Amino acid sequence: MTNIVDIKQLHRSFGGPAVLDGIDLKIAPGEFVALLGRSGSGKSTLLRVLSGLDTAPAQKLVIPQRRSVVFQEPRLLPWKTVIENTALGVRGGDAQSLARQALADVGLAHRLDAWPLTLSGGEAQRAALARALVREPELLLLDEPFAALDALTRIKMHGLVFDLWRKHHPAVLLVTHDVWEAVALADRILVLDRGRFIREIRVDIDHPRRRGDPQTSSIETELLGELGVEPSHA
Ligand SMILES: Nc1ncnc2c1ncn2[C@@H]1O[C@H](COP(=O)(O)OP(=O)(O)OP(=O)(O)O)[C@@H](O)[C@H]1O
Ligand SMILES: [Mg+2]
């Protein structure tokens, strides 16, 4: 199958040392990839290039036309209602009914006419997810979308993202600091360090994955080691 992302030798720097130092990355259609790395390792820089928000020199840079991004903060327009914000994601077609369906998918059917500032953090991130998915992206880029949420809401969001991925089946690149989030969700996990991938792990474990079983634990421990974290401090 043709990869929908195919990048060779991507470089990015901001005047100083390279932030992305010759990245190669391929992502298959519908594949769920998690990206881990310490703060400042270049994760958001890579996502910005993949989203088209930033440009950078590369030997090869194939990215799909239909792609969406969700950031750590929801970035909803405060002067538009939830359904109006969601409909912004649609190009052509019946924006209203597609937006209504997307909001139902994320459990916000009862908040269509709400103002963004009246939403909880979790609701606002669900609205941001609906806006991202409404255009049926081939590539969904998620930059720590749950980092600002409380632990319980975050666990619920894992389930939601997984269900949405199963339903819409975009390729996903999820940036996260949460090693368990990566192990719970991803087909493949990449670790970025100083602008290079230092580790790639395929996660061939059926869903739902259980935290603490020997298979998931050994991957978690290995990743924490790569990130320089003692498991007892995770
Ligand atoms: N627009 C910019 N101008 C100058 N330096 C930048 C710019 N964007 C990123 N950098 C630098 O590039 C490096 C990588 O930043 P990036 O935001 O990609 O890290 P990150 O892995 O996403 O970190 P975090 O986990 O903290 O979000 C950092 O040293 C940062 O200061
Ligand atoms: Mg970042």
Image (tube, rainbow, N blue to C red):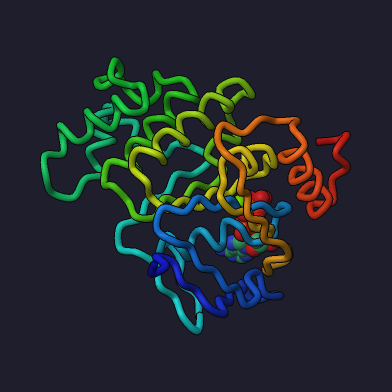
Q: Residue furthest bottom?
A: 59
* Residue 146 % position (x, y): 56, 34
Count of numbered labels shown in the rendering:
0
Whether residue 226 is situated above or below residue 117 in the rendered picture: below
Res 44 quadrant in image: bottom right
The residue positioned 39% from the left and 18% from the top of the image is 118
Q: Residue furthest top?
A: 110
Quarter of the figure with the N terminus: bottom left
Nearest the eye: 171 or 74: 171
The residue positioned 70% from the left and 30% from the top of the image is 211
* Residue 188 % position (x, y): 59, 54
Whether residue 99 is situated above or below residue 115 in the rendered picture: below
Nearest the eye: 112 or 102: 102
Res 196 quadrant in image: bottom right
* Residue 122 % position (x, y): 48, 25
* Residue 119 % position (x, y): 41, 20
Residue 196 lies left or right of residue 26; in this view the side is right
Nearest the eye: 172 or 187: 187
Residue 105 lies left or right of residue 123; in this view the side is left
The residue positioned 84% from the left and 45% from the top of the image is 229
The residue positioned 71% from the left and 62% from the top of the image is 199
Residue 194 lies left or right of residue 161; in this view the side is right
Quarter of the figure with the C terminus: top right
